[in-house]
Image (spheres, rainbow, N blue to C red):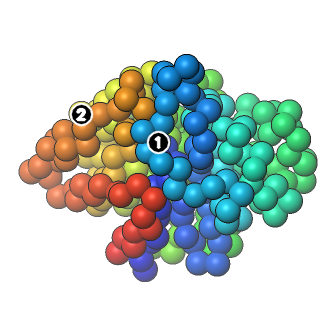
Amino acid sequence: MAFEVTWIGQGGYLFNLGDKVLCVDPYLSDSMNNDGKFSRLLPIPIEPQELKADMIICTHDHIDHLDEATILKTNIKDIVYGGPDSCLQHYREIGIPEENIVAINRGDTYELGQAKIHGVHAEHIQDSIGVIVEYKDVRVYLAGDSLYHEKLLEAKKLRPNILICCINGRLGNMNYKEAAQLAMDLEVEIAIPSHYGMVAENTEDPSKFFRCLKGTSIIGMELEHGVKVRIP
């Protein structure tokens, strides 16, 4: 069974799960721009109002993961918004109806059509999560923002075969060496680097990550921004 994923920048992804679409951490604005600092380098691949998703999950309440400017332009009445408790509170504050909000904390599972969405530990802020998307025979672990920590290895019990992991090594995230080590520790088949290229002050060269995987059985894969990729 092939798995379709689109990198929409930073830690944001679209997952096509049969008749359902999951969006995680959409940053589709220039909200981080502060007088020229942290201005986005990548174009916005899709306007928020054109985002066709059944569910949006924000892994934690930081602006490049829960972006009000993005969320408020999405089709609120037709989308379910999930995440840990701090994100749920933010959703409420900006007017997301309670019936469109669902808690996904560490240890929680949510069924989205034929897929299961698991919340797992992320070592970043108090209740930040990683997400494991289980769809038929594919289990992709999106680590979200996180330092390397032994608690991340608890995800191994869900047998992820694809890892998408931050490599930027700044502001509470693991670096490319630690990301490669996590891929090896989890014994995944495919490892995809994430959280780079969006702002000049917080990026990394993904080729360094791929070099760390040399000599292992893990396939390093680089996604192209805004392009849907079919992963067998």
Relative to 52, is 25 on the left or the right?
Answer: left
Residue 222 placement (x, y as % from top left): 29, 55
* The quadrant where residue 106 appears: top right
Circle 1 residue: 10
Q: Label 2 to label 1, Cα distance in Å?
A: 19 Å
- The disc labelled 1 sits on which kind of residue? Gln
Q: Residue 177 has which mark?
A: 2
Relative to 3, is 64 on the left or the right?
Answer: right
State whether residue 136 is above or below residue 35.
below
Answer with mark 2 or mark 1, whichever residue precedes in sequence. 1
**Which residue sits at x=57%, y=21%?**
34
Residue 155 placement (x, y as % from top left): 46, 47
Relative to 189, is 45 on the left or the right?
Answer: right
* The quadrant where residue 92 appears: top right
- The disc labelled 2 sits on which kind of residue? Lys
**Tag 2, which secondary structure?**
helix
| Farthest residue, direction front | 35
Q: Residue 107 has which mark?
A: none
Few, some or many residues within 10 Å of mark 2 (<14, 14–19, 20+): some
Is residue 111 among the parts visible in the rendering? no
* The quadrant where residue 31 appears: top right
State whether residue 49 is above or below residue 84.
below
Residue 166 placement (x, y as % from top left): 39, 39
Relative to 224, is 47 on the left or the right?
Answer: right
